[in-house]
Image (tube, rainbow, N blue to C red):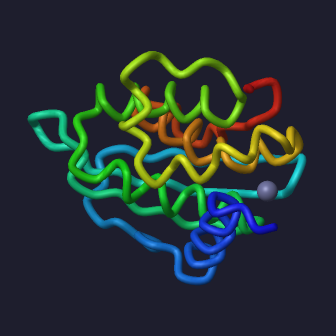
Amino acid sequence: MSDPLYDLYQELILDHQKNPRNFGDLPGATHHADGTNPLCGDVIALDLIVDAQGVVTDVKFKGSGCAISRASASLMTQALKGKKIDVARELFEVFHALVTGSKIPKGKEELLGKLKVFSGIREFPARVKCAILAWHTMKAALDGVQDGKVVTTEGNE
Ligand code: ZN
């Protein structure tokens, strides 16, 4: 029997893997970070433009890796555009709870939107890092990571 959420998950992941959204360079980026998931070999470079009001007006990523890491980065960029950075940080916490199977704070689940398709990842602990890589990289970019420092998922659940 087919599970509708599983089908949606497959479809969305494949779509975003084949046609990643917001992929490429971002001239005028105000925030940048590089991330790696050594367990799987996923790498990502993330650029954001945050305006004077603290709104993420644009975000792009580059990199290579497995379907999950790519789809997660692609869907993340879509979710972040137009969000204030405090909401982006909140979204990190909620997504993190979703993929690690922790409790999602009450009333926060709707923040996830399409990102809910990653709920199945918690059944595959080895892939959680693939899904979370882009998000750790985003958080580091917002925190102002040192130039040349690469964010790693190792020791960073
Ligand atoms: Zn991966």
On screen, residue 42 versus residue 15, left or right, reads right
Q: Quadrant of the N terminus?
A: bottom right
* 109 versus 104 height, above or below: below
User: What residue sits 48% from the left and 59% below the top?
Assistant: 75
Of 119 and 146, the residue lying toward us: 119
Tag count: 0
User: What residue sits 64% from the left and 63% below the top?
Assistant: 4
Image coordinates of residue 124 in percent, x first then y, are 86, 44
Taking the view exactly as shown, the residue that stands out farthest to the bottom is: 18
Of 75 and 120, the residue lying toward us: 120
On screen, residue 35 versus residue 60, left or right, reads right
Image coordinates of residue 41 in percent, x first then y, are 84, 57
**Quadrant of residue 111 within the rendered picture:** top left
Q: Quadrant of the C terminus?
A: top right
Taking the view exactly as shown, the residue that stands out farthest to the left is: 53
User: What residue sits 61% from the left and 83% below the top?
Assistant: 18
User: What residue sits 75% from the left and 46% below the top?
Assistant: 121
Image coordinates of residue 122 in percent, x first then y, are 77, 38
Image coordinates of residue 66 in percent, x first then y, are 77, 66
Of 78 and 3, the residue lying toward us: 3
* 125 versus 2 height, above or below: above
**Quadrant of residue 67 within the rendered picture:** bottom right
Taking the view exactly as shown, the residue that stands out farthest to the front is: 1
**Quadrant of residue 98 within the rendered picture:** top right
* 80 versus 62 height, above or below: above
Of 139 and 111, the residue lying toward us: 111
- Ligand 1 placement by image quarter: bottom right
